[in-house]
Image (spheres, rainbow, N blue to C red):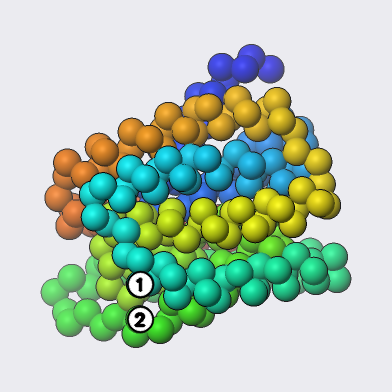
Amino acid sequence: MQLYILVILGFLVGSLVISIGGGGGAFYLGILTSIVGLSAVNAAATSLYVSLPSLIIGCLSYWHTGYVKIRYGNKMIFSALPTLIFGSLVAKYIPEIVYKWTILVIFVFLGLQILSKTFRKNKAQHHLPENAAYLFGALSGLMVGIAGMSGGAPMVAGLLLMGLNMPQAAATSSYILIMTSIVGLILHVAQGNIDWSAGSWIMIGALVGAAITPRIIAHFDPKKITALLRPVMAILMILMGINMVI
């Protein structure tokens, strides 16, 4: 495979996921398994290796815009880390089909909730309480611990349902995912090998995408960005959930 293809794919994924607030675990897993040809175990470890640097760069870029909401982020980190460690310990005992169908139900439910809020503009908006951050953080931790996914999707969904706009949710999610990805990477490296070559080329593209996208988003109206990206995020969540069982 031509290495520039991996760089381009990394750039596209890095730009997309930093704008919608994910680490890109599901997308990187898809590239690493279907295009690079890695096993699921190696792909899980490599995806966390790929996503971590771009998360750091993206978060630093967002930090200067003021979109990172530390209070929400810290609550999610507090609940995500214990479930991440627990998930990594019990992963080998959970039947894959059970995990996949559970994620399908959760993703479709959250996606439909976000779509409902999106198309209910003229009615009073009822947001989840701030302490719901603990629930979504715990769910994200399980996703990282069990499958090596970034866990960004439920984080962003929760932040949106708690009333944050899309740039705020994306920025805050990148802040949270730095910590969960570090812990997840350490745990998964012990169980699987990282493909340093393929991962590094994808990472180069992802770093560029993550560095420039937050600065571009900062020049646009947050309400317009939210109106555009919130339904995109909802549809992606539903599609990722369905893809889990196909």
- Of the image marks 1 and 2, the number of the one nearer the N terminus: 1
Q: Secondary structure at mark 2?
A: loop
Label 1's element?
helix
Q: Where residue 183 is drawn, which disc sits there?
A: none
Q: Determine which quarter of the picture holds residue 233.
A: bottom left
Quadrant location of the C terminus? Answer: bottom right
**Outermost residue toward the right in this view:** 93
At x 37%, y 72%, the residue is 72
> In the rendering, at what x and y percent does residue 133 appear?
43, 77
Q: Is residue 114 at least partly visible in the picture?
A: no
Q: 10 Å neighbourhood of mark 2: few (<14), some, or many (≥20)? A: some
Residue at left offset 57%, top offset 20%: 5
Residue drawn at the location 47% of the way across and 52% of the way down:
22
Q: Picture quarter containing residue 219?
A: top left
Report the side of 96 relative to 32 (left or right): right
The residues bearing labels 1 and 2 have C-alpha atoms spaced at a distance of: 9 Å
Front residue of 118/53: it is 53
Kind of residue at badge 2:
Glu
Residue 30 location (% of width, % of height): 64, 42
Residue 130's disc number: 2
| Residue 209 in picture, x, y percent from top left | 41, 33
Q: Are marks 1 and 2 in contact (CB under 8 Å)?
A: yes
Q: Where 163 falls versus 246 (above or below)?
A: below
Q: Is residue 153 left or right of residue 99?
A: left
Tell me: residue 99, above or below residue 210: below
Does the image show residue 183?
yes
Disc 1: which residue:
71
Which mark is in front, 1 or 2? Answer: 1
Residue 99 point in image, percent of width and height: 72, 68
